Amino acid sequence: MSATAPTADPTRPLAGVKVVEFCQIASGPFCGMLLADFGAEVVKVEPPEGDAMRTWPPLSDGYSENFASLNRGKRSIALDLKQPADLEVARRLVLDADVLVENSRPGAMQRLGLGWDWFAPRKPALVYASISAYGQDGPRGGEGGFDVTVQAAAGVMSVTGEADGAPVKAGVPLADFASGLYAAYTIAALLARVRAGGAGGHIDVPMFAATLGISALQTSEYFGTGRNPRKLGSAHPRNAPYQAYAASDGWFVIAAGNNRLWQSVCGVVGTPELLADERFTTPTLRAKHQTELKALLDPHFAARSVEHWLAAFAAAGVPHAPINGYGEALADPQAAHLKLVRPQVLPGGHATRTVGCPVRLDGRTVEVDTTPPALDEHGALLRGKA
């Protein structure tokens, strides 16, 4: 990335928007990256030692590829916010910006003199977004947290894994990224209000609440039945067959979410007699008796290869998939069609790759700046501007 300010791309919807990000690790940096992908100019304010994720492996020529994956297209300035001169630089950067994003423990920004209470009277149009574990107030508002603790508190771990297994978290950090998505979405909404002549505001994004927000099927099941949803492994509480099955040489998934698809499954597997079995005549009944149904299907699936079953279900129009690793997923022809894998050059010159913006606008891939910043790479320029 050049040390000069990036040229705004007028084709991207957030072109001209200035963002100052006071964030580390995942949720806040992900939010900032989403804004940068859509054209915002994002300045990442880091402590002198840098965002802690800069130390996370894998390291390529000493630079964290984890960090690069969440901080592309940003500029970096290192500030010691406890020092008056650096605090003043930070304040001037924000007063010249449209958006502030922070994911500190509640109260930390206020104690530094960078809270919403300081900026609100000085810049009413500012959109100030705070991401935290449980929110800015309330009985747990002062608590910190990480993705795994929020997954546990918000119920995700209670429905993840095999029915008789130990609690496990989702392999992808859902709480971090759900809260980053909610923050970016709400920032965009408030920016529309500001552009229409309205005020900015303080956005409070609790990771706990965001994780419950994306758990709509599970919370509605609880509200409708009064019972906690349970772990089902790869199975589904309301549809079957809708899970992973073992073939002779590996695993695959099918999803027969309605009666027509169920009929197709029976045709492919060669079990027409199951269509007349009163245990399996509706999706609800099949889900209720899915253990018995799986026991009847398993011997058939175990007799043939994954390749055979994927081809057969493809021909029958039944949704299906192999159990991919990320290497296989990234090599999928559809990933190539969507131009998901993009080249990335780290500050030391190391060439790697990253997943670009997954959204297409007007039928076209959103082209993003994939270059992540070196620590304080733009400090001299930004101090001069501030």
Image (cartoon, rainbow, N blue to C red):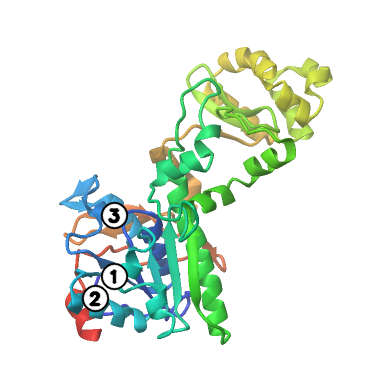
Determine which residue is flagged by label 3. Answer: 67
Earlier-in-chain disc, 1 versus 3:
3
Q: What amino acid is labelled 2 in the image?
A: Leu
- Residue at left offset 20%, top offset 54%: 63
Point out the frontmost of discs 2 and 1: 1
Front residue of 271 and 192:
192
Determine which residue is flagged by label 2. Answer: 87
Front residue of 75 and 327:
75
Regarding residue 338, the answer to whether it shows in the image is: no
Of helix, strand and loop, which one carries label 2? Answer: helix
Point out the frontmost of discs 2 and 3: 2
Q: What amino acid is labelled 1 in the image?
A: Leu
Q: What amino acid is labelled 3 in the image?
A: Phe
Kindly identify which numbered label has been placed on residue 260.
Answer: none
Q: Is residue 367 left or right of residue 282?
A: left
Q: Is residue 47 left or right of residue 71?
A: left
- Residue at left offset 20%, top offset 80%: 383
Point out the frontmost of discs 1 and 3: 1
Judged from this view, the residue extending furthest toward the front is: 139
What whole-number distance in Å separates the C-alpha atoms at marks 2 and 3?
25 Å
Regarding residue 123, the answer to whether it shows in the image is: yes
Q: Give above or below for 364 relative to 143.
A: below
Which quadrant of the figure has residue 36?
Answer: bottom left
